Each structure stands twice: as structure tokens, then as C-alpha cells.
Image (cartoon, helix red, strand yellow):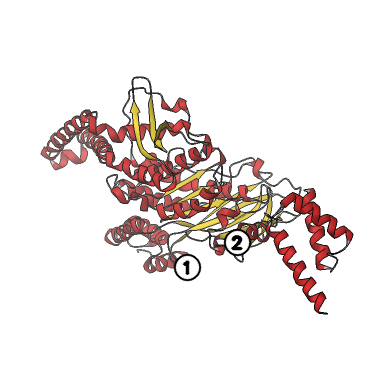
Amino acid sequence: MQGKKRKPTRTVAEKIEGADKGHLGDMFEVAEWLETGRYSLDINEQKASEYYSRIDEALREKRPFFSTLELVNYKGIRKTVKKITFDPHLNIFVGVNGSGKTSIIESLVKASTWLVNGIRNRANGKGIDLIEINKAEDSKDCAITTTLSLDEKSTFTLELYKNKNSKGKSRGSLSEFKNLAEMYYSHNSNSQGLACLPLFCHYSVSRALEIKSDDQKNNSEIYAFSNLDGYNSSFEESKNFGQLLKWMLFCGAQNNGELDDIKNTLRSLEVKYNTTFDIYNFLAEETKENSQIAEKIRNELDSLRSEIKELQITLKTADSNIVTIVKEAIYKFMNIDNIRMKVDKTSVSILLDKNGITISATDLSQGEKALFSLVSDISRRLILLNPDKGIDALNGYGVVIIDEIDLHLHPKWQQEIVGNLRDTFPNVQFILTTHSPQVLSTVPNHCIKILRNDENGMLSIDEAEFSLGSESDMILEDIFLVKSRPENIEQVKMLNRYQELVVNELWDTDEAKELKTQLEEWAGKHDPVMKKIQMDVRLREFRRGKN
């Protein structure tokens, strides 16, 4: 007698309900169960295929972004008082040195590796190292818990966990991030290399040092790039500027005929594939099912398909017009023009015009190098990860994490950098840190996260009350809690004392008169506070005279 089918467990029922409501993670799991009949579900390949199609379509249209983060005993942070919530577009963390900015960034980078490594080759990401656990005696368990959202319905949670006494690998809840990575992996595999993949990348404070003369040696080799190369060195401390040179050289190669060999190879492979496919079709059905020869032919067809796909992507990406997108992006940020390649027998270099003078990219200032390498690298990666978008590749999705966005930048550029990033890469979530009032004056207050780490390591996050359009002095005092004037300077101490005397109606004392004389010698008519104090004195003299 055949046993009855068990009723789906509550968890399975919830997953099915979530799939029907549009949760991508639930769709993916239920589709796998329907393919295999797992959890006593009836096999339904058609329904599974429908789910996979909906997932594939959603991954092209939905923008991933980090939405929450919690930390427990991670580095210098004992615990986040409550969940850190992220704006889908822009987040800027500020705080004194040691307040936890770097720990937050590194935890998000660690979480991102589970997606990038999974998308590339189904590999795992980075766990928590023992050395990263808080050093307090009672800090036994360390945890990083973060949520990535694609929309209101589809959220994916990752928990990394490590016990101080554990000698093994980190534990935690990994399945949702691994499933999301598998979705993107399948999306890419089934899209003939034309998938829309999200960018995840981190830029450290060493990014200004990335343009080096050693990167510009010419080894006369044409490199082929695939879309997954957009993830190369995503989280390394220093990006390789040579990769940009190789890519620009590769994209421009079609203009001088150097890609003819690739085109000829592709044609030969296509002929070989068609011939092999005809031979396979000529086999009897019984031979196809049981013959080692048929198995060998199928393996050969799979290998040929893979080679053809890679070369097709190579030719699609090798478009000199694509390089123009990168150049135009850089022009939005910097006062330079006419970026171009110079190739000779020993070197490949990037030349550009600055103030009408031709210079090499290696001769840019540190601030210019920081901007040039940052903007060009983000642009290049988005183009590689979105080969089917063409000139719209900069509208690709992703999360970009940048430490000290104001690094080496002139105050004018500090006031422009965030707006330019958002305009140039509108679908990227930016997570930044800064010490610059000029940067914060261009940002809505709800995007600013002020870190307060108390003596017990408890981390709380406050939002700024006012920032957009504010004066730098106000931001310095209200957000950074730093006096706009250096209080250890003798003249500032004198100014504060003189101001105190005036407020207390003592502006005409000998002490006040002496301070006024010294301060006028110091500041002349340039200091706005001295002007305000003198106006205040005149008003007080007028009132005293009336009385």
C-alpha cells in the first residue's frame, strides 16, 4: 500500500506562499523543490521554469542595496545599540578616529565577498577571523548580520558568526546570500554572457597611489575580457591601474585590426560546432543514450559552446566607443580633456590635456589621481558587468564603498564629488566615510550617519539634524563637534575672552581695551567675529547712553 504524502511543513508552506507573493529567494528555493520533488512536493518542471523566468527578469530590473547591519564584538565595537539602517542610494559615516567607521566598512566588504565569489565561481566568501573578535575578556561571540534588499518583498540576510574558543571556520546563516549568488550565477550562465550583474567594490585610502609607471609596460599581448572580469580585485586594498590600460588597449584594438585573429577563431569554432552537432544528430537514439562515443561528442559540444560564448562576449565588449563612456565620465569630475592612449614597443600610457598642455596620467596630482582612478575603475567595471547595456552601462546596479571620499581633494572638489558620483552612477548605492564639512554640506541630513562609540564599546548612530546647503563652520561644530576655531591658539583664547567681556558689559575696561588693540593688530578688518563684536559694542554703548 502506497503511503500518503506528508503535508508540507510550515516552513515549506511559508516558502511557497512567499514565492507566490514575489519573494525571489523563496521562488528560487521552491523552484528547486519542484524540479526534484523535495519535501514531498509533486514534480512540476513547468512551474519551476516559470519561477526561474521571473527570477531572471527581476535580476535584470531590480537594484540590490544594503538595508541593515548589526555588529556584535566585531573589532572595537562591542555592540550596535540598534540596527544600522541604510539609505538605498547614499550613506556617509562620520565620527572621530576609532569610532567604528572602518569596522562598518570592513564588515560590509566581508559580506559582499559572499556574493561576488558566489557569482564568479560558486565559491564562499570571507568569514570572521579570530583576530577580529573584540579583545574584552567577556567577548566570546562575534557576529556580523546584514540584510541586502532587491525590493520591499525580496530581502536576503547573511549572518557571520565566530566564537573566540572556536578553532574551526566561521559559522552563521549563509544560505540566503549563497542562494542569491547562485541566482546571479545562473542568470549569467543562461544569458549567453549578456547578463546584467551588480557591482560590489571597495576603494581604500590607498586608491590615490594606484597610477604607477610600472603598470604601463607593454608586453605586446592582447587580453580578452569577460563580463566577470568586472569583479577582479574588487576588494583588494590597491586596484591595479594596469588593468585599465589593458582594457582600453583591448577595446581600441579592433580599429587597427588586431582582433581579426579572434574573429577568425570564432568562425572556425562555429563551423566545428555545427559539424559536430550534425554528427551527433546522425546517431541513432539508442546510441545517443548508451554510447561512450555519444557522451564524448556531448562533452565536445559543451566545450565548444563555452569557447564560442567567451569569444562572442570578447567581440561585443571590444568596442572603442565604449572607452568614450569612461572618458566622458572622467570629464564630469576633472578639468581635463582629450584622454588618449600612447603605445610604443616598450610602454603603454594614457595621455591627456590639462590647461592646454599634454601630460601623462602619472603626472597628475594625488587628488587628481584619486579621482581619475576611482571614476575610471567604477566605469570600467560597470561596462564589463553590463555588456548588453552599451552606452547605458553606467546605469548599472551595485554597491560601491569608499573610505575617506574627500581624500586629497581640494575643497571645491569635495563639494562636488558626491553629487557627481550620484549623477554619473545613478543606480549605485554609495557607502562612504568622510572627515570633510564640505562633503556633508552637499548631502541631505538623512544620509549622514554620526557614530557615537561610548567607553564600553556600544555603538549608536545618530542622523544629522541639518546639513544640505549648510555652512562648513556650522557642520564642523554641530556634526563633528569641533570648534570652528582652533582653541589652543593664543589669539583665539584672546578673542573668546574679549567676547566674554563684551557680553558682560565690560567692553570699556582696561583689560578689554588691551585685548581689542592686540586683536585688531592680529586680524585687522578681516575677521567676521571681530566685526560682529564691534557692532555689538556700539549697540551696547547706544543703549547705555539712552539710559
- Can residue 243 be spotted in the picture? yes
- Looking at the image, residue 484 sits to the left or right of residue 296; the answer is right
x then y, percent, for residue 245:
38, 32
Residue, far front:
545
Counting from the top left corner in percent of width and height, residue 103 is at: 62, 48
The residue under label 1 is 10
Quadrant containing the C terminus is bottom right
* Side of 301 relative to 178 (left or right): left
Disc 2 crowd rating (10 Å Cα; few below 14, some 14-19, many 20+) is some
User: Mark 1, residues whose alpha carbon is within 10 Å: few (<14), some, or many (≥20)?
Assistant: few
SS of the residue at dot 2? loop
Residue pictured at 58% horizontal, 59% vertical: 448
Q: Nearer the viewer, residue 369 or 42?
A: 369
Q: Are marks 2 and 1 in contact (CB under 8 Å)?
A: no
Q: What residue is shown at x 80% (from left), y 49% (from top)?
A: 490
Q: Which residue is mark 2?
A: 83
| Disc 1 element | helix
Q: Earlier in the sequence, mark 2 or mark 1?
A: 1
- Which numbered marker is on residue 326? none
Name the residue nearer the viewer: 359 or 311: 359
The amino acid type of the residue labelled 2 equals Lys
